[in-house]
Image: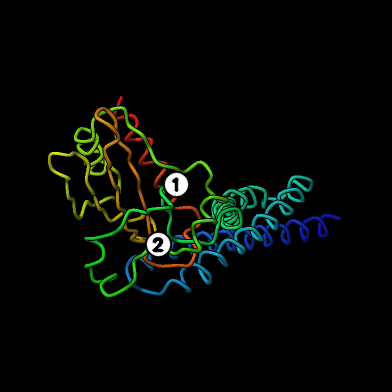
Amino acid sequence: MQSQGAGTGEATLWAARVGLGLALIGLIMEVASGWGYRHGWWGLRVALRYLFAYGGVVAIVACVVSLVVLALAIGTKSRGAALALLGVVAGAVPGVLFYRQYRLARSVPPINDVATDLTNPPGYVTAATNDFWKGKDMSYPAGFADSVRRGYPDLGSLVLPVPAAKAYGLAHATAMGMSGWEVTGRDSAGGGGGGRIEATATTAWFGFKDDVVIRVTPRGADSAVVDMRSKSRVGKSDVGANAARIRDYFAALTQAAR
């Protein structure tokens, strides 16, 4: 009986090590996906599919294995319980991250260019001359408008209860203060107030660069309309990143205007 119990304990300990090992592999794959892409070690397909996505799958498998082992280890008082618990924790982080991204990707439109004014979207001037976009068509894709309306019904022009000149100053200051943004161009409308602001937003993990244009238009003497467009340089779907960027900027600008 003791020999059988010892054998079961050794098997449980071995399985716990396997679960923890898989969890760490999944975690490393996900961390490396963005880090390596940002530093040019591999392309987008390798980063997103073979490292991030497969790393998430490996992590989920590790969680399942570790949970089963944990239940067995507790029941048999095996030494593998602590390792199994570590496997659950280490696998949960990349597993949950992958699952959340997967759910998000399925819940948003598969587009990479979002604007608040779909009738007359803000146009790029500075971005159109950079190395990536130079010579390419930067007009707003006609087929994206319906997708934005259906997928992001909350997005629209922002009306600020301040004169256009002040609104433009607030818009520029807010853009300068956004994390990961670099203001690349601006053009005020002179005495009439308002104008255009452009920026490049760089994501923290993968280092994706998206181009932003903000347009401030007078609305009478004491208010202004702010519109924004955010466009990804790579990928067919931004997984909601551009819409989230617009929401974050408008929230910060609204707070600044109070």
Q: Secondary structure at mark 2?
A: loop
Identity, as a three-letter code, of the amino acid under mark 2: Tyr
- Going 40% across and 67% down the picture, which residue do you hit? 234
Q: Which is more toward the observer, 109 or 2?
A: 109
The type of colouring in the image is rainbow
Sort mark 2 into few (<14), some (14-19) or many (20+) by Cα contacts within 10 Å.
many
Vertical side of 103 occupied by 194: above or below: above
What's the CA distance linking mark 2 and mark 1? Answer: 18 Å
Residue extending farthest left: 191
Q: Secondary structure at mark 1?
A: helix
The residue indicated by pointer 1 is: 244
Image coordinates of residue 66 in percent, x first then y, are: 67, 54
Position of 225 with respect to 193 (left or right) is right
Image coordinates of residue 197 in percent, x first then y, are: 23, 49
- Residue 224's label in the rendered image is none
Sort mark 1 into few (<14), some (14-19) or many (20+) by Cα contacts within 10 Å.
some
- Residue 140's label in the rendered image is 2
